[in-house]
Image: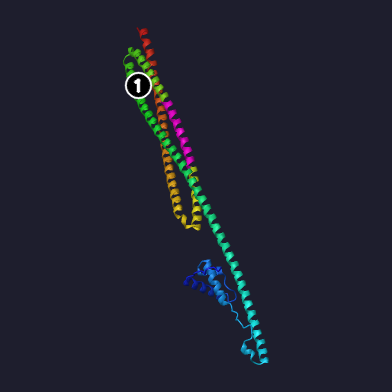
Amino acid sequence: MTQPAIQIPTDVRERIITAAANLFEQAGRQTMPTVDAVRRTARVDMNAASAVMKEWRRAQTAQATPVAVTVPEAVQQASSAAVATIWQQAQGLANESLRNAQAAWETERGELDAMRQELAEAFERQLGDLEAASAALAAEKDAAEKQAQELAAVRQELAAAQEQAHTAAARAQEIERRAGELRRELDRAHQDADQVRAERDKALQQAATSADLVEALRTELAAANSRASEIERRAGELRADLERANQATDHARAALAEQQKTAQSLAGQLDQVRAELAKVQAKAEASDEAHQEQRKLVAAEAHRQAERLTAVQAERDQARKEAAQAREAAARLSGQIAALQEQTAALLARVTAPAAEAKPALRKKPATD
């Protein structure tokens, strides 16, 4: 059963014949062009190229001329000598034609074998290219899935870093509120110190005008000492609050340092993700244009993650700035407390000195009488 002939369009057949003729001329009409070379030049499929090239090669091969096998009746009626001579010449021509036909058949069979080998090699090359493309596509899919997993992990870590940044900001606000309370306590302490200073001045004036007011001065001095003790107690409380504020500041600083390490780690991971993403994009652009949309989505996601990381770093810097302000406020409170202690000590020294001078003057009065 014969196979149906392949229907080849006229323009395709002409392109194949033109490409074969050009390649044959370029080879100096010494070697027939290969089917794969003609297919690539004419840009047609392998089946059409094979069918047309088979016809073209047959057209290029000399055809055998058929000869008569038996002596015709007219020749037998001629003379015997002429018939024998003519018959010998006819046999020679027939044998020569047969040899030419056999040589042409051998040449065509060799060409067919070469064409079959070329078709097999072209098929193997195309199969290898297809397998390589499939393997590259599978590798790119695996890389894309891996990148998606890494992006999800980075997204979770960024969410955790944002939560830590919010916690640090809340701690910084609490420290600022406590520093405000400490400033108000210090203002009240200054007011009490001013009141004690006014009472001390009043007591000194009363001691200078009359020695009889020494006992009242002692009473006032005792009250001043009591108030000084109260001030000292409040100063101790302020110191304790300051110590707690310092501890809170240390905790905030540790949290900020941990957050900074996390942000640096995230930045490093994000750089790795960007590098891997660039590699995946380069491979995807070289292998298949169908992944353009997916690469755009991955690049956009990486860009969004970079913007989120920048926002987290800005929040970290803001929290660090607020912690530094809290430390400065605590340092100012510590200096004010130290100044208040010095003022209290000076106040006690000034109050004690007039009292010591007033006691001998009071004892000399009975001796003079």
Quadrant of the snapshot with the C terminus: top left
Relative depth, front residue between 219 and 109: 109
Judge whether 215 appears above or below 262 on screen. above
Judge whether 55 appears above or below 94 on screen. above
What kind of secondary structure does the magenta stretch mostly adopt?
A: helix
Q: Is residue 354 magenta?
A: no
Q: Residue at x 43, y 44 (%)?
A: 308
Relative depth, front residue between 171 and 59: 59
Give the magenta range.
238-263
Which quadrant of the structure image shows residue 223?
top left
Is residue 97 visible from the viewing direction of this image? yes
Residue 358 relative to residue 1: left or right? left
Which quadrant of the structure image shows residue 172?
top left
Residue 93 picture location, percent across and down: 64, 84
Q: Secondary structure at mark 1?
A: helix
Q: Amino acid at mark 1?
A: Val
Alpha-carbon neighbours of circle 1 within 10 Å: few (<14), some, or many (≥20)? Answer: many
Q: Is residue 254 magenta?
A: yes
Residue 105 picture location, percent across and down: 62, 75
Quadrant of the snapshot with the N terminus: bottom right
Colouring convention used in this rendered image of the protein:
rainbow
Judge whether 90 appears above or below 19 on screen. below
Is residue 275 visible from the viewing direction of this image? no
Q: Kindly identify which residue carries mark 1.
A: 196
Residue 6 picture location, percent across and down: 51, 69
Relative depth, front residue between 240 and 46: 46
Q: Residue at x 38, y 16 (%)?
A: 222
Residue 368 relative to residue 29: left or right? left
